């Protein structure tokens, strides 16, 4: 016996016919919403870059003029706040004479400046690669070149400052040097900008202390003041770019980039004070290294200097468990 076919109501049939059309409309609406959000984010980034350009035009320095390069080095001053010395608070520090302590801090300050030049050169290459063939009318492009110009001046300033402190050309360890060579060539997006942020944040906290400290040689305080003022804009841009590059990033990408940033941070921070500073200051190098590695006071200063940075990395999803392990080894958390 043949089955009878129940005729489908006309309204239901029409709805079935329109289902693919509705799905297409919904997809289009979602895509339009995402595109609108992207446009809004890009506009916000341009506005932020425009404000940075205005700030740079209103307040920037020429180190060749601002720093008193002709004044002789006064050996009655420290090169950094003594509390920031890698040996401050150790038994070895207690045994040093006051002139020895001052010479040590001058050499440590010069080492931080020399390593700062190394990383600023990495930074400049990463930013240049990122802006290659991009829209030169975009304020973000113009700000990036402004930042590179700032970094060129800072590197010259640090180099002259280290020479004035009677220091040699301190360089990072060979492994860090070669990894830096690869990093500057390969790092992109959030890995590049978040690593820039880590280096600048740590230096910023140190130098804010040094520039206010009357025990520090005046020309170093001037250098630190210039760097703090101008780097505050660079840090803002690095934060904005890190957030922008991570927008829509998946879990796997965030985890991978979080570890890359943490490893880069480890080598930057642990390279800041060269082992050669102890020999240059006339100290027992092996003993100085051992006491510096065990110095809880210095580790505590590093951790406190990075508290705001770690909050930012956490909010950006870059403070994963493997990354935290690396930051702990560098005493940044």
Image (cartoon, helix red, strand yellow):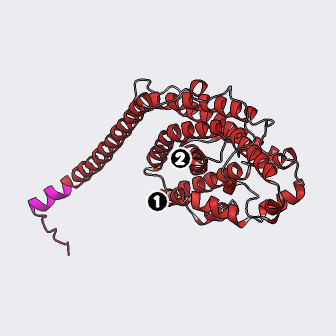
Horizontal side of 119 relative to 307 (left or right) equals right
Q: Is residue 211 above or below residue 3?
A: above
- Stretch in magenta: 1-17
Residue toward you, 67 or 232: 67
- Residue 126 can be seen in this image: yes
Position in image of residue 184 (x %, y %):
66, 38
Query: Which label's residue is closer to the chain start, 1 or 2?
Result: 2
Q: Position of residue 323 (x, y in %)?
A: 62, 61
The residue lying at 60 percent from left, 24 percent from top is 64
- Tell whether position 149 is magenta: no
Q: What residue appears at the point 38 percent right and 31 percent down from the top-left corner?
A: 54
Quadrant location of the C terminus in the rendered image: bottom right
Residue picked out by circle 1: 315
Percent of width and height locating residue 303: 61, 62
User: Residue, x 48% and y 47% (percent of image)?
Assistant: 239
Marks 1 and 2 sit apart, C-alpha to C-alpha, by 14 Å
Count residues near mark 2 (Cα–Cα under 10 Å), then give few for <14, some for 14-19, many for 20+.
many
């Amino acid at each position: 016996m043949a089955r009878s076919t129940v005729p489908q109501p006309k309204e239901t049939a029409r709805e079935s016919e329109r289902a693919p059309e509705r799905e297409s409309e919904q997809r289009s609406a979602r895509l339009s919403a995402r595109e609108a959000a992207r446009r809004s984010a890009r506009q916000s980034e341009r506005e932020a870059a425009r404000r940075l350009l205005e700030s740079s035009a209103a307040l920037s320095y020429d180190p060749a003029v601002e720093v008193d390069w002709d004044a002789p080095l006064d050996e009655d001053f420290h090169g950094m706040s003594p509390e920031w010395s890698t040996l401050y608070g150790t038994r070895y520090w207690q045994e040093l004479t006051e002139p020895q302590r001052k010479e040590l801090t001058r050499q440590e300050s010069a080492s931080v400046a020399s390593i700062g030049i190394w990383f600023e050169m990495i930074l400049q290459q990463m930013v240049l690669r990122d802006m290659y063939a991009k829209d030169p009318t975009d304020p973000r492009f113009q700000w990036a070149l402004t930042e590179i110009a700032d970094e060129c001046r800072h590197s010259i300033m640090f180099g002259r400052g280290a020479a004035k402190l009677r220091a040699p050309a301190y360089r990072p360890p060979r492994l860090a040097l070669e990894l830096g060579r690869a990093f500057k060539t390969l790092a992109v997006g959030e890995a590049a900008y978040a690593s820039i942020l880590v280096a600048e944040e740590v230096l910023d906290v140190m130098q804010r202390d040094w520039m206010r400290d009357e025990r520090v040689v005046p020309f170093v305080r001037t250098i630190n003041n210039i760097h703090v003022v101008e780097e505050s804009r660079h840090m803002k841009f690095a934060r904005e770019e890190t957030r922008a590059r991570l927008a829509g990033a998946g879990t796997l990408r965030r985890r991978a980039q979080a570890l890359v940033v943490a490893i880069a941070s480890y080598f930057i921070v642990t390279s800041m004070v060269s082992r050669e500073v102890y020999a240059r200051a006339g100290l027992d190098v092996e003993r100085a290294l051992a006491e510096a590695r065990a110095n809880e006071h210095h580790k505590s200063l590093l951790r406190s200097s990075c508290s705001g940075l770690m909050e930012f990395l956490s909010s950006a999803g870059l403070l994963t468990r493997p990354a935290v392990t690396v930051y702990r080894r560098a005493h940044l958390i």
